[in-house]
Amino acid sequence: MLIMNKYEFGNDFIWGVATAAYQIEGAWNEDGKGESIWDRFTHTKSKNPFKERIYQNQNGDVACDHYHRYKEDLDLMKELSIPNYRFSLSWTRIFPDGKLTSKNQKGIDFYHRLIDACIERNITPNVTIYHWDLPQALEDNGGWTNRDTYLRFLDYVDFVTKEYNDKVPRWFILNEPFAFTVLGYFLGIHAPGRKGFANFYPAIHHVTLAQGDGGKIAKKNCPNAEIGTTFSCSYIEPVSKDGFWGILNQGAAIRFDALLNSLFIEPMLGMGYPVDRLPSLKTLEKYYKEGDEERMKFNADFIGIQNYTRELVQWSPFMPVIWGTIIEAKKRCEKTTEMGWEIYPEGIYHLLKKYASYPNVKKIYITENGAAFPDQLVEEDGKIRIHDIERINFLKSYLEQVLRAKKEGVPVYGYFIWTFIDNFEWAEGYRPRFGIVYVDYQTQKRYVKDSGYWYRDFLEGKDV
Ligand code: IFM
């Protein structure tokens, strides 16, 4: 495989790692923190005796204990020469019931300490405002299906962007709106566990409003910071293109692409929902109020794209609305990651080209990319080592495609590995390990994997 050097990406390219509050912090009810939908979801037993909600009924109560160990974690980040840390704020640490009136000074102070500790170590804090942990009190009132949640979100954005203002040069309004609405409000496999179109459609619209107006508020409060938001995306291809079935498969691929890759970005860019490719989205109009088209728009300084895999799709008469299905990677690939995802580096290249072709996309950061593999600990010369060569190869092959897109003129200016330390992978619990640092959850000891050392060498300018 090719030898890489970070200078090929240019001196203005930013490098970092990403995490999320619920996945690493723990301390779920400490110092006045309120309950989030993930606390409730993981603490509630599944009604189906044959299917747990979360792998082995695990939860994020302790996770990586980052709430108490953030200084050591940042020391390690510094040792690995990582210049940017992207983390999220837990809404319920700041407003335990989601509303301004419940302000919790201890939670507010924690993020001051975390941000200050980054700055002291010369690590730039990159802050995500919402990474899925909605206050349970707002969910009790309908969550994202209730328009009021969008208004409470705006209060929260206004508060945090004023509070941490000049210490944070880069803000991310939402993390992957498609993922948290589809998994949490349509499929019911993530918190808050709601299902069906009656939940999904209003959640989509209110989240889109939160994204647009949230971005505008952040920009008003932090005019000198870069304000953007992130989108999950998967490169979509039809399983075949030839003949009658091929034509149907191509139609399904267009619909899936609209849903997975365009649903949230196009309204932000002023293009409205992708109704031309997925006509059922017209239903969203039911939730419109006068002026919403303007509210959905936001002139972002950058977009963050988060890519892991590709999906192959096939026409299906059994899936109303989308009229297609995804063919699971496990059924068609010899090798997948621990998540059962295909390793398909070219996909990130195609997606970068797609997003760069939208008018008004000024700058792109890859705000998440990485892979889970079954890491093995080995003892060598009295030291624990993790030779995760598959992860190194994964990262290199995706970066190679990012560089390819950049050389062709795509304005991509940053890359964040998902993730720094192994953590709570939502419904999959602690089983999949995505980190470049291994966490022993019994002792909370951290061990740098070979991929962590590889990233350090790369960031220090060595050929790797
Ligand atoms: O762990 C998640 C993260 O919270 C959001 N993006 C995808 C990651 C891997 O599944």
Image: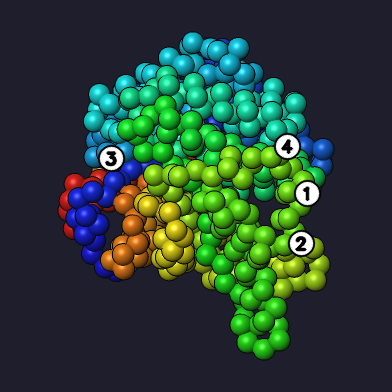
User: What is the number of the mark on residue 197?
Assistant: 1
Q: Residues within 10 Å of mark 4 (few under 14, many from 20)?
A: many
Residue in the image at 38% along x and 29% along y: 222
Q: Dot 2: what SS?
A: loop
Mark 1 and mark 3 lie on one chain; the one further toward the N terminus is 3
Instruction: Check if mark 2's residue and mark 1's residue have beta carbons within 8 Å.
Output: yes
Could you tell whether 402 is left or right of 324 in the image?
left
Q: Is mark 1 within 8 Å of ligand 1?
A: no
Gap between marks 3 and 2 measured at Cα: 44 Å
Q: Dot 3: what SS?
A: loop
Gap between marks 2 and 1 measured at Cα: 10 Å
Q: Residue 55 or 101: which is nearer the viewer?
A: 101
* Residue that numbered label 2 is attached to: 321
Residue in the image at 48% along x and 35% along y: 216
Mark 3 and mark 2 lie on one chain; the one further toward the N terminus is 3
Instruction: Check if mark 1's residue and mark 4's residue have beta carbons within 8 Å.
Output: no
Could you tell whether 47 is left or right of 109 in the image?
right
Q: Residues within 10 Å of mark 1 (few under 14, many from 20)?
A: some
